[in-house]
Amino acid sequence: MSAVPIYGSPALLVKIERERTLVVADLHLGIEAELAKKGISLPSQIPKVKARLLELIKKRKPDRLIFLGDVKHNVPIASWQEWRELPGFFEELTKLVRVEVVRGNHDGGLEGMVPRWVTIHSARGVALGKRRRVGLMHGHTWPSPELLDTRLLIAAHNHPTVEFRDEFGGRTVEPIWLRAKLDASKFPMTLQKQIRGELPELLVVPAFNELVGGAAVNRGIPKELIGPIFKSSAVKLDEAEAYLIDGTLLGEIGGLRK
């Protein structure tokens, strides 16, 4: 089993039992409708996102493409843009690869926008491999018990970033991969009773859509971090490692906050 971030891209290639799975998260397609309400007019980003995905599929030749939640953006009601463009988006991708979605908190009504042969998994996640070696979830819920019996738990939802500031007050924010250990004592008792042995390592995936914001994990106490795993302090954040999209190891989050 291997799970390797693709150099220069917020995408992950998981190889398990001779099957190659491309994993991306937080596309938030249709976010332009929300931005338009704030006075920011942008053309549809769906063609651009689709082109990036098609290029990854062409180069990496995966057997499966799994979206790790929040494929669409607008909730509780989908925008006209999502209803108009998402069916074609999925149709084109399914011609090349098997497509699946792990439901995110923005994915209400997604069933009506995808071909019937696109599999939509529960928000509590799905395990890959006969021996359940890798777990996939969005991150706005607690994982299902079967995901705790894996070696690696891959989640999204937070759009993790690191904030850089220079001596003149300039500020830049860069997306990161976040690699962390989990604390079993912080899980709900119902889940603690179902933990067998050591918990999986957690890998948090950066957002695929460049327009969405992110939670700066090194900005004081990162209150922006959401989802029960983070809110409960089940993630050992200070000891977690941050990696830039190009693979550069920035170090532990605790050290980046000093």
Image (spheres, rainbow, N blue to C red):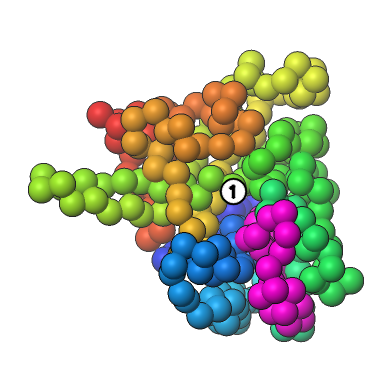
Estimate the x, y position of residue 36 in percent, counting from the top left: 51, 69
Q: Is residue 232 magenta?
A: no
Q: Quadrant of the C terminus?
A: top left
Q: Is residue 200 visible?
A: yes
In the rendered view, would you say 251 is above or below 214? above
Per the image, the residue denoted by label 1 is 156
In the rendered view, would you say 124 is above or below 108? above
Say what amino acid the circle numbered 1 marks: Ala
Q: Is residue 78 magenta?
A: yes
Badge 1 crowding class, 10 Å Cα cut-off, few under 14, some 14 to 19, many 20 or more, is many
Task: Please tell me which residue is depicted at 78% across the width and 36% down the height of the picture.
Answer: 144
Q: Which residue ends up furthest to the left in the rendered image?
A: 168
Query: 257 or 74: which is nearer to us?
Result: 74
Estimate the x, y position of residue 202 in percent, counting from the top left: 58, 38
Task: Please tell me which residue is depicted at 43% across the width and 69% down the height of the picture.
Answer: 40
Query: 171 or 32: which is nearer to us?
Result: 32
Query: 19 or 229: which is nearer to us?
Result: 229
| Residue range of the region highlighted in magenta in the rendering | 63-91
Task: Please tell me which residue is depicted at 42% across the width and 33% down the height of the picture.
Answer: 222
Estimate the x, y position of residue 173 in percent, counting from the top left: 33, 52
Residue 11 appears left or right of 195: left
In the rendered view, would you say 128 is above or below 239? below
Residue 232 appears left or right of 92: left
Q: Quadrant of residue 146?
A: top right
Residue 113 appears left or right of 239: right
Q: Is residue 23 visible?
A: no
Estimate the x, y position of residue 131 in percent, counting from the top left: 80, 44
Q: Quadrant of residue 251?
A: top left
Numbered disc 1: secondary structure: loop
Query: 198 or 125: which is nearer to us?
Result: 125
